[in-house]
Amino acid sequence: MSRKVRRFNFVVAAVSLAAVVLIYSGGFATVNGVYHRVRKGETVWRISRGYCVPIEQVRKANNLPSSMKIRAGQYLFIPGAEKVVKIEPEDYQIRYILRCGTSNRWKYVVIHHSATDKGSARVFDRNHRRQRHFRHGLGYQFVICNGSYGRKDGQIEVGWRWREQLDGAHCRAGNGNRIGIGICLVGNFNETRPSRKQFNSLIHLVTHLCYMYNIPVENVRGHGEMPGANTECPGKNFPWSEFRKALYERVCK
């Protein structure tokens, strides 16, 4: 075959490929889906959310490990997507939270209030060790602060039990300590309501956890809603209607 004929065949092949592949700066699209080029700071959850494709489909399509670890410059195939979209990098704390959680046992998110006006993860850890004799300290996986004890309003504190993927000590009912992720908001919601920043942080955190562990919104419950529980926690003033509406709006169906 002559050089001129080979060159012609190459041009024809390139034109044919262009008919089914659209090139973008962040990746390229094919007739079956999109190849997304990972940028620094992006997570699998964030990418799947941006394309509204379940994270498990992205994981299986790319044979990703359970840790969901990816690197900048890597291409991920997003099945069913029609075009490449720009993904805003997630904040550092959420990336850290997702890296810590590698267990697939989590089935519930259990929401608590501290029933105190003030608090922090350190304060609760000390109390749980001294008063309740919890060997691993803080019984919750996460604490969302209200601006007391030098913490910012809405600040998410990550507990030792989450970092080490240990059982919680926050909800015996419904096996909640074993399969439920405990989140405590500082405040007494029998008397007041969560601050707007606490509420937004809770939505942000729970949305990520639901995606990461395929937890349905129906399994995001208050302590008192767990089977067999006998408590008002997280308080009669917790805004369940607003919370569940916001959560449904953020979780892709």
Image (tube, grey):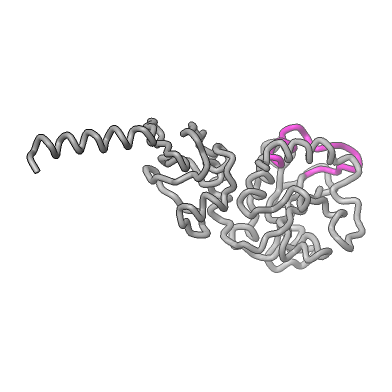
Residue 175, position in %: x, y?
78, 66
Q: Is residue 245 visible?
A: yes
Residue 103 quadrant: bottom right
Q: Which residue is rendered at x = 55% and y = 41% of the image? A: 46
Q: Which residue is rendered at x = 67% and y = 37% of the image? A: 152
In the picture, measured across the screen, residue 126 lies left or right of residue 53, that is: right
Q: Observer-nearest residue: 10 or 212?
A: 10
Q: Was residue 174 drawn as part of the magenta stretch in this picture?
A: no
How many circles with numbers are drawn on the protein? 0
Residue 191, position in %: x, y?
91, 39
In the picture, measured across the screen, residue 225 lies left or right of residue 203, that is: right
Q: Was residue 193 drawn as part of the magenta stretch in this picture?
A: yes
Q: Observer-nearest residue: 182 or 89?
A: 89
Q: Quadrant of the N terminus?
A: top left
Q: Residue furthest left?
A: 2
Q: Which residues are magenta?
A: 186-203
Q: Which residue is rendered at x = 33% and y = 33% of the image? A: 18
In the picture, measured across the screen, residue 92 lies left or right of residue 243, that is: left
Residue 228, position in %: x, y?
89, 63
Q: Observer-nearest residue: 135 or 214?
A: 214
Q: Which residue is rendered at x = 54% and y = 39% of the image? A: 90
Q: Observer-nearest residue: 101 or 17?
A: 17
Q: Quadrant of the C terminus?
A: top right
Q: Is residue 40 visible?
A: no
Residue 76, position in %: x, y?
44, 46
